[in-house]
Amino acid sequence: MSSTLEHDPRVIEERAGIAGVIRGYGTRLRQGDIGQLPVLVGLLVIGTIFQIASHGVFLNPFNLVNLTLQMAAGGTIAVGIVLVLLLGEIDLSAGVVSGMCAAVMAVLSVRTGLPAPAAIALAIVTGMAVGALHGVWITRFGIPSFVVTLAGLIAWQGGLLRVLGKTGTINLQDPLITKLAGTFFTGVVAYAIAAAFILYVALGPLISHRRRAAAGLTVPPLAVVVLRAGAIAVCSLVVVYVVNRDRGLSSGLLFLVLAVIVMDFVLRRMRFGRMIYAIGGNAEAARRAGMPVKRVRAVVFMLASAFAAWGGILGASRLLAVNQSAGQGDVLLNAIAAAVIGGTSLFGGRGSVWAALLGIMVIQSISNGMDLLSLASSIKFMITGGVLLSTVTIDAVLRRSKTTR
Amino acid sequence: MGTAHTGPLLELQGISKRFGAVQALTDVRFDVSAGEVVALVGDNGAGKSTLIKVLSGIHKADSGSFRWQGHDVSVGSPNDAARLGIATVYQDLALCDNLDVVANLFLGHELATAGGPLAVMDEIAMERKAVEVLRRLSVKIPSVRIPIASLSGGQRQSVAVARSVMGDNKVVLLDEPTAALGVAQTHEVLELVKRLREQGLGVVLISHNLSNVFEVADRITVLRLGRWVGTFDAKGVSHEQLVAFMTGAATVPHDALPAAATSAAGPS
C-alpha cells in the first residue's frame, strides 16, 4: 500500500467540483439533515418584514444591541437543549431550573452576602446536581426523559418558590452580577474580539482543508472553503460595525458565542461528542461498540441543566432581579424552539450546537419585532407557536422523505 | 498470520447450554481456521443463534471447552471475545445511520492522541485507515464521508463487515449477512466474504440460504435440535443431503462420514 491515498474511482465515487458540493448539499437536505439553510432564509425574511413594518427601527443599532442582550439567556439554555436533543431525549425542566438556579445565586449573593463568583459557581453546581439527578433517574430506572424532566419541571418550580421564600423578588446588587451580561466592548476591542472569532471559525476549516489535502484525502474545492470563511468574516465584521455605532458588543452575546464554540468543539472533535451523536443515532449500536451509554446520557443531562443554570444567571443579570416567575412562561419553549429551528432534529443524532445561536436569533428577532410593533400578547403567542410548529414539521417531513427512500 | 500455531484458530468441543427447561445446545463441536469460511446451518431452533452467542461471548456455555489458537480460554463476555479477536456482525448491523462511514468504522474505537472521552479524535488518520480498509476489501461506496443513511442495503452490510476487520480481529461471525438483500447486493456481500478469507481471516457464516452457503463456504456445520449433526466439506455434500441432515430426514451414518466431518473431533 502506497503512503498516499490518491483518488481511486474503483473505491470512492466522489463527485468533485462546486457542482458536486451543491449536489451533495441537496442530498443531505433530502436525507433530513436540514442544516442551517432554513434559519438563514428565515432570518432574512424576518429581518425584511420587521424592518419594513417598524419603519426602520428593527435594524437600527440600538435595537440590534438590545436583541443581542435578549438572546444571551435563552441561547445559553438552548445550548443545553441541543445536547439533550442530539441524544434523542428532551429536557422539559430547563426553564424552571434556570429560574431556580438564578434564585439560588440571588439568595446566596444578596441574603447570605457571599461574593458574586462563589454565588454564581454554587448556582451552576446546583444546576449540575439537578441535571445529574435527572440523568441518573432516567438511566437507572429506564424512565423516558420526557416524564422525569416533566416531574422536574413541577418539582423545581416548588424549589424556586422555596429558595425565594416570602419576599418573592430579590433585587441583585453585586456589580459583578449586574454587569455580567451587560458589559460592553466597543471600538478596537470589539474588532479584536471579532478578529479572534473569525480566525477560529474561518481559519479552522482552511487548516483542516490543507491537512486533508496533504494527507491525500478528498477535499471540497478550496473556493467553497474560502467563500464560507469570507462570508463568516463579513457577517462578523458587519455585526461589530453595527453594534459599535451603539453600545458595542455585549458580554452576554460573547458568553453565548463562547459556549457555542466550546460545545461545538466537544461535539465535533472529542470522543465524548462522537458518543453523543452515536447514541442519538442508534443507542444499541453505541452500546455494542462499547460506549458507556448510560454514563454519557447522565452527563449530558447534567450539562443541560448546568447550561440552564448559567442561562438563568445571565437572564437574572439582565433583569437585575430574580422573582417567582423566573424561568417560566416561554423560556423553555423558546429554548427548544431555538434548537429545533436551528436544525437540530427532535429524533436525535442530527444537528449542531450552532443551532442554539442561530435559532435563538430567529426566536428573539420575532419576539423583539413583535414588541416593536406592539402586537397583542395573544397574537405574539400564536405566531411563536406557529413558527415552532412549522420548523418541527419541516424536520419531520424531511425525515420521513429520507426513510421512505 | 505470523503465528506459529497451525491448528484451528477457534475450536469448541462438548458445548452445552441450557436456558431453564430448554436444552439449547447439547455436546456441540465447532471449529474454524484462518483463511476459511465455515457455514453454520440448521432449521429454526437448531441452536445456531445460541452457538453464535457462545462464540461472541454473549452467553457462556454451561460445559465444554473453548480453545483459541490451541489454548483453553474462558469467554464470558463480549469484551472477552473482542479481546481475543472475534468480531460479530449482527443481523441488524448495529450501525449509526446519522454518522458517516468513517465514524461507523471506528465506532467505539476512535483514533485519538490520548485515551478517554475528552480526547480529540484524529479524523485524518481515521479516514486514511478507513479508505485503506475499504479499498483492500474492494468495497464500493460513494464516499467515506456520507452518512450511512444514504447507502444501499448491500453497502451498509459491507460497511458493517468492514468494521469487523478494523481491529486486530482474526475471526468474523456473520449472522445472516444476506437476509435482507437483493440479488446483486447479495453477490457483493458474498464477494466480500471471500475477500475476508483471502485476508486470512476465519469466517463463520450463518445463513438460511443454502445456495449462498455453497457459494462461499469451505466447510458446513449442521446443527439440529441443539445437537451437532456433522461438519462437511462443502464440495463433498449436496444441497439435498444438507437439507436432509437439517430436517432430520437423514442422519449421518457414522462409518460413512465424509473425511471432514470428524475434523472437529480430532484424533480420539
Image (cartoon, rainbow, N blue to C red):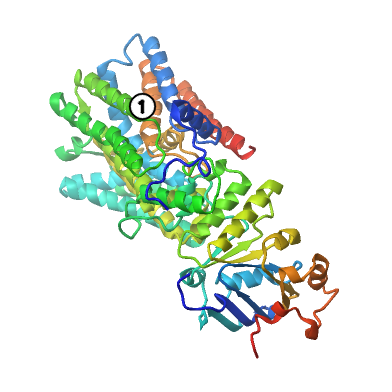
Rendered position, A367 above or below A304: above
Q: Nearer the viewer, residue B117 or A376?
A: B117
What residue is rendered at 68% in x and 46% in y? B184
The amino acid marked with disc number 1 is Ala
Does residue A312 appear in the picture of this structure? no
Q: Where is mark 1, residue-wise? A: A223
| Residue at the bottom extreme, as displayed | B268
Residue shown at 56% from the left, 33% from the top: A398
Q: Is residue A24 left or right of residue A63?
A: right
Where's residue A368, x and y in %?
Answer: 36, 22
Residue A291 in view here: yes
Residue placed most toward the observer, B44 or A284: B44
Residue A264 position within the rendered picture, expressed as x and y whole percent measured from the top left: 34, 42
Tag 1's secondary structure?
A: helix
Which residue is located at x 54 percent, y 75 percent?
A: B9
Q: Locate residue A326, reporting x and y percent.
A: 34, 38
**Residue A44 sits above or below residue A149 on the image:** above
The C terminus of chain B lies in quadrant? bottom right
Mark 1 is surrounded, within 10 Å at the Cα level, by few (under 14), some (14 to 19) or many (20 or more) other residues, namely few
How many marks overall?
A: 1
In the rendered image, which quarter is residue A204 located in? top left
Observer-nearest of B169 and B225: B169
Residue A319: x %, y % from top left = 26, 32
Q: Residue at x 57, y 58 (%)?
A: B195
Looking at this view, name the residue that lies furthest to the front.
A2
